[in-house]
Amino acid sequence: MHFTVVLSHDVDRTYKSYQFMTKALQSLRSGKIKQALYHKFSVFLKNPYWNFDRIIAIEKAHDVKSTFFFLDESIKFRPFQPANWGLSLGRYKIDSPKIAEIIRWLDKNGWEIGLHGSYCSYNSSLLLAKEKKRLENIVGHEIIGIRQHFLNVNEETWQLQSETGFGYDASFGFTRDIGFKDNRYRPFFPLKENENFLVIPMALMDECLMHKKDIQKEYLDIMDATEKNNGVLVLNWHQRIFNEKEYPGYSKVYEEIIEEGKKRKAKFALMGDIYQEYAHRRRIAN
Ligand SMILES: [Zn+2]
């Protein structure tokens, strides 16, 4: 059977800020003293959330590439609404030299760059267009892929994304679980107005899988289902979780899934390749 594995990374934050405090408190509350101490003192470590070098090394070792979705968040900080901190604090400036440099490096070396649409952009053409343009200015060419932050999507989002010039959306999936939402094992074209706009579903997100009891059984089951349906299995491993100290075992499982896919002779592709392939097939069929 033929199936495809697609690797992707949402880049939510590239440095640790208020999490030194909140993560330490969470760990203390759950009785994990060692973890709490790590969080408290990791402020002295160099960039625990950077991790790009580590991801690149892992993927090079397995001869695979991935799609990175970069966030251009502009939501305002509200000091008296802690629920807002995760959205507004610790974010990076997409056009700061260090971020722009890694984006350009990835782009030039065969990785794919997509936009991680900001929290409020799912219903704002203005934000979508602004964020797309800014990322395009960094890479120097068109950006065709998007995944919305928190997978925020409503009935209009795909239409708005398509009107803004995106070719595909990668936000279709569960926020707190794993598996194929609505049994969509393959990408699909949801719009009548733009027949070429593709949705590429996501089935495996790091934390949702890692919180399962039998992690290996869960991902093997999902891979079986993908294989049986000639499907496309999209992984989303946030780049911050490649920090082994804070997220022990996460990157190991990422590698295991890649190895399992290789063992089963899966094809590995970038999101953009899937988009081209489906658009091409559609042209032939029409
Ligand atoms: Zn996100």
Image: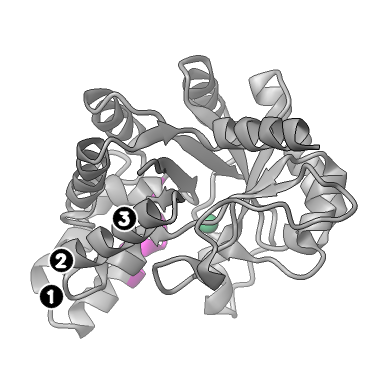
Residue 180 at x, y percent in the picture: 47, 65
Residue 245 at x, y percent in the picture: 17, 52
Res. 151 image quadrant: bottom right
Whether residue 116 is situated above or below residue 175 in the rendered picture:
above
- Say what amino acid the circle numbered 1 marks: Lys
Of residues 13 and 106, the one drawn nearer to the viewer in this rendering: 106
Whether residue 76 is situated above or below residue 254 in the rendered picture:
below
- Say what amino acid the circle numbered 2 marks: Gln
Q: Residue at x 64, y 22 (%)?
A: 139
Q: Which residues are the magenta region? A: 15-22
Residue 12 at x, y percent in the picture: 50, 51
Q: Residue at x 74, y 30 (%)?
A: 284
Whole-angstrom CA distance, mark 3 to mark 1, is: 33 Å
Of residues 91 and 67, the one drawn nearer to the viewer in this rendering: 67
- Say what amino acid the circle numbered 3 marks: Met
Q: Is residue 20 magenta?
A: yes
> Mark 2 sits on what residue?
35
Which residue is the extreme one toward the top? 108
Mark 2: is the Cβ under 8 angstroms from ligand 1? no
Q: Disc number at residue 32? A: 1
**Residue 95 seen by the camera:** no
Which residue is the extreme one toward the left? 34
Whole-angstrom CA distance, mark 3 to mark 2, is: 32 Å
Of residues 140 and 36, the one drawn nearer to the viewer in this rendering: 140
* Quadrant where the image shows the N terminus: top left
Residue 44 at x, y percent in the picture: 24, 46
N-term mark: 3 or 2: 2
* Quadrant where the image shows the C terminus: top right
Marks 2 & 1, CB-CB < 8 Å contact: yes
Q: Secondary structure at mark 2?
A: helix
Marks 3 & 2, CB-CB < 8 Å contact: no
Q: Secondary structure at mark 3?
A: helix
